[in-house]
Amino acid sequence: MSRYLITGAAGFIGSALAKRLVNENHQVTTIDNLSTGLRKNIPEGVTFIEGNTFDKAVIAQLDNVRYDAIFHIAGQSSGIMCWDDPVYDLNSNVTSTLLLLDYARRTGCPKFIYASSMSVYGDENPCPVREDDELKPKTFYAVGKLASEHYMRIYSEEYGIKCTALRFNNVYGPGQNLENLRQGMVSIYLAYAIKERHIPVMGDPKRYRDFVYIDDQVDACIMAANGNEANLFNVYTTATNRKTTCEQLVKMICRELPFEVTVEYSGETKGDQFGIFCSYEKIYNSLGWEPKVSLEQGLKLMVTWAINDLSISNSVSLPCDQRKD
C-alpha cells in the first residue's frame, strides 16, 4: 500500500485516477476547490481537503504527511477561461505547482507527476508533434503549463525529486462534466446534442485535435509514477498520433446518437490552436505506454454513459451565451 496525494479528485481526470488507486488499495488524499468538480465524484475512502491548491493555509492541512507521489491534476483547465482572469489562471496552474513542489521537498516526497498540456506547442510545428519541437504557447493557460514544467525541472536538478510532466491532449470519456461548456471538446458537443439536438461549433470545421480516452490517460499517470527512467526530469506527450477534425468528431458523435442532430459552424475562439496531433513514441519507448481505446470505441462508451444516466442528461443546462469549445 502506498500513500498518494491527488489534486483535483472531484474533477474528471483526478477522480478517475483516484478511483483506480483506491481500487488498488492505496491511501489517497485530495485537495479540490470544487470550482468545476463535484464532491460526489470523489471516490469513497479518499481523504478530502476543500480549498485552493495555491493557498498556503490549505497546503498546511496536509500536516506534513510524506506521500509516495504527488499527482498534480487540479488547475484552471480551459484555454478559453484563462482570458477571464489571468491572475487566477497563474495562481491555479503555476503558484499551486510551486507550493506543491516545495511541499514535496520539505516532506521527502520522491515523485511529482504534473498534468501539463499539448497547448504548450502552439501552432508552429508539423504534425505529429514531438516533445523536442518548438514551444510557442498562444494562451495564458499554456504559458502557465510551460512555466510549471520549468519549475519541475529545477526542483529535479536542485533537490532530486523525480518529476514527470505529462502533456495531455484532449482527454474524454464517461464521467466528463457535461455542464461545463467551456472545457472539453467532446463533452461540449455531446452535451449540446443531448439537450438541444443541435451542436453549435465555434470555429473552422477543419480544425483538428488528438483525443485520448480517460482510462488510457489514467494508465499514463500511474506508469509515470512507477517509471524507473535514469533522468529525474521527464516530459511526455500522451496522444494517439491520430488527426481528427471537428467535423469528423461531430459526425462520429451523431452516428452514436439515437436521434437526429443539427450542426452549425460559426465564429472562432480566442487563442485557439487550429490543429495539433502528437506522437506518443517517447512515452512508449520510455514507459511502454500506448493508447488502447480507439476514438470510435471511446465515443460509443461515452455516449452510452451519457444517455443512460438520466441524472446527467437532465442536469445539462445550455444557455445560448455559453456556446464555446
Image (spheres, helix red, strand yellow):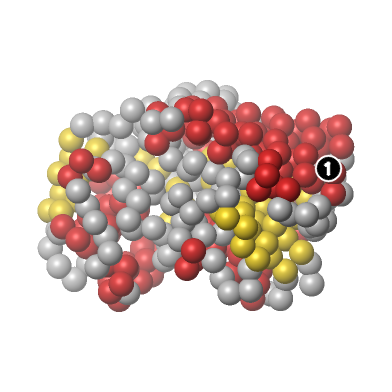
Which of the two residues, 44 or 177, is positioned nearer the viewer here?
44
Q: Which residue is mark 1?
A: 105
Residue 218, visible in the rendered structure: no
Image location (x, y in percent) of residue 75: 54, 44
Image quarter of residue 50: bottom right
Q: Secondary structure at mark 1?
A: helix
Q: Is residue 179 above or below residue 44?
A: above
Residue 63, visible in the rendered structure: yes
Q: What's the residue at 15%, 59% (across, down)?
A: 197
Q: Would residue 205 appear left or right of 230 to someone viewing this image?
A: left
Q: Would residue 130 appear left or right of 244 to someone viewing this image?
A: right
Residue, far front: 57
Image quarter of residue 276: top left
Amino acid type of disc 1? Arg
Image location (x, y in percent) of residue 14: 56, 58
Which of the two residues, 91 or 309, is positioned nearer the viewer here?
91
At label 1, counting other C-alpha atoms closer than 10 Å, the crowd grade (few under 14, some 14-19, many 20 or more) is some
Q: What's the residue at 67%, 62% (across, down)?
A: 29
Image location (x, y in percent) of residue 21: 66, 68
- Name the quadrant of the N terminus: bottom right
Image quarter of residue 139: top left
Q: Report the label total.
A: 1
Q: Is residue 90 above or below residue 289?
A: above
Q: What's the residue at 22%, 52% (across, down)?
A: 318
Image location (x, y in percent) of residue 70: 72, 52
Q: What's the residue at 19%, 48% (across, down)?
A: 319
Q: Is residue 47 above or below residue 108?
A: below
